Image (tube, grey):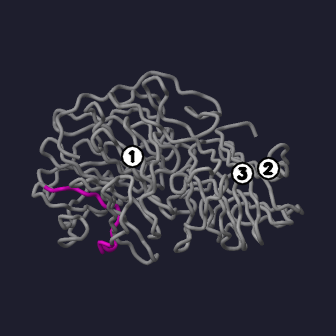
Amino acid sequence: MLAGSLAPAAAPLLALPAPRGKVPWGSGADGQRKADLGNGTFRNPIVAGDHPDPTILKDGADYYMTFSSFQSYPALVIWHSTDLVNWAPIAPALQKNLGVIWAVDLVKHDNRYFIYIPADPKGDGWSIFVIWADDIRGPWSDPIDLRIEGQIDPGHIVGEDGKRYLFTNGIKKIRLTDNGLATDGVLEQAYAPWRYPDDWVVENFAPEGPKLLWHNGWCYLVTAVGGTAGPATGHMVITARSRSVHGPWEHCPHNPLVRTTSVEEPWWSRGHATLIEGPAGDWWMVYHGYENGFRTLGRQTLLEPIEWTADGWFQAKGGDLSKPMRKPGRGRASPSAPPLSDDFSRNRMGTQWSFHEPAAGGAGRARYDGASIRVQASGTSPANSSPLTCIVGDRSYQAELSLDLIGNAEAGLLLFYNHKAFVGIGFTPDTLKIFEYSEELTWARRPLRTRTLRLRIHNDENVITQSYSLDEGRTWTRHDTRMEVSGMHHNVFGGFLSLRLGVYAAGSGEVRLRDFRYSAAPAP
């Protein structure tokens, strides 16, 4: 972002009551909850479900954003908005498997778009890669390894000298070539971040996620410290400023600018922020947080107004983020994400569906076949099958899907965190299976001769009920075993992931997926 003039004060919170009951605010009968309340206000999150480490770009009247994609492929879905509140996915930017991907930076320079990507392709060490495109919708280039080894969380900035730099965790910096596709210097320490009092309850110091911008002649460095997960009071946002990207840096006297201070707050572990100018010239902060009691949903994307102060710093003005706030002014009406229900008549690979930890080329296991998807079987069970997954953002929801076994295949519907943490229901041509906490309950097997089955999972605030239908959903049989899954999140299993809907296809042959239906908070 370029330097701008002093912005007016952000809109205040509205004193509207938060809705009560099982149905999350903004949820339709079909689709995830929406941020826009339709009356000039919004409520967080602006992107529900697992969308952590947001990196946001203002490009004229348009805004683009992407998130950490971890082990999901296709990866790095680009989202678009014109009002900062309603967001819709465009397309994935990365098809080639780079292994685990953490916080990236999306930038535009000289009319070209770049994404700087920390990745661990072989599981033996991090480096930073870059992809580029002349159109935000792609096609995007193949990734280029910048060989910035052992670093994560790149943040791009053009210095007062006209040169391009990446800042990384630590907080370190390295100069780039003018085309941004190679390094042109050595990695060096750039800034010693502000430290919080020693008696604060945090995960660890962990300075990370540097995001930089110029404003009124100052270069502002916005950093996360305190650890990403762990205690709810750990993660936070701090800032410093300098007249030069080379320092010296001045700590903000108001640090931390954002921090969860009590487990009673609606959003936990808030941090990893980027500042962005709104359509009306007001200013906002985009960051992530865990919803109180629902770490299973992952880190969700939050929007909070900020105010530039007379001393040249800024302050967060959102207050209680569970309450409605006025939308940014003058933004053009922007579509939100489409409903999750999918008849498979058009390609949603990447924008909705992705494979978890696929082998090289494994993201090509799915092919569209009229009003269905055929998925090649992989592995022998959900524990090694690289399931097809879908992010959800509601506290309570129901999902159902018809599955046809082709060849010697096995398939099922899951709630999937990773290969060590999943639950679900599946079947072979002669057996119904149930999975609880990452293993099959063999004593709960039922004989069932069929190659076609419709499966349903109902999640009522982390209490799971599963059912099956032999007649395409006209009648249902509930499985006797119910499960509670509130512990399936990062603080237990690591990986910074979320509990997603998943479809596994194991054995040999293929599985046909038909008529996926999703609804928020229905009756079980």
Disc 2 marks a residue whose amino acid type is Ser
Residue 467's tag is 2
Of residue 459 and residue 117, the one placed in the foreground of this image is 117
Could you say where residue 78 lies in the image, as x and y percent from the top left?
42, 51
Report the mark closest to the observer, 3 or 1.
3
Residue 287's tag is 1
Instruction: Determine crowd level at label 1: few under 14, some 14-19, many 20+ residues with C-alpha closer than 10 A.
Output: many
Residue pushed farthest front?
370
Point 17% across, 72% down: residue? 185
Instruction: Determine crowd level at label 2: few under 14, some 14-19, many 20+ residues with C-alpha closer than 10 A.
Output: many
Q: Which element type, helix, strand or loop, lies under badge 3? A: strand
What residue did someone put label 3 on? 401
Q: Are marks 2 and 1 in contact (CB under 8 Å)?
A: no
Could you say where residue 172 lies in the image, as x and y percent from the top left?
24, 64
Q: Is residue 148 magenta?
A: yes
Residue stretch in magenta: 145-159
The quadrant where residue 102 appears: bottom left
Disc 1 marks a residue whose amino acid type is Tyr
The quadrant where residue 148 appears: bottom left
Of residue 207 and residue 429, the one placed in the foreground of this image is 429
Q: Are marks 3 and 1 in contact (CB under 8 Å)?
A: no
N-term mark: 2 or 1: 1
N-term mark: 3 or 1: 1
Q: CA distance from mark 2 to mark 3?
A: 11 Å
Q: Is residue 399 magenta?
A: no
Q: CA distance from mark 2 to mark 1?
A: 37 Å
Point 29% across, 64% down: residue? 170
N-term mark: 2 or 3: 3
Q: Which element type, helix, strand or loop, lies under badge 2? A: strand
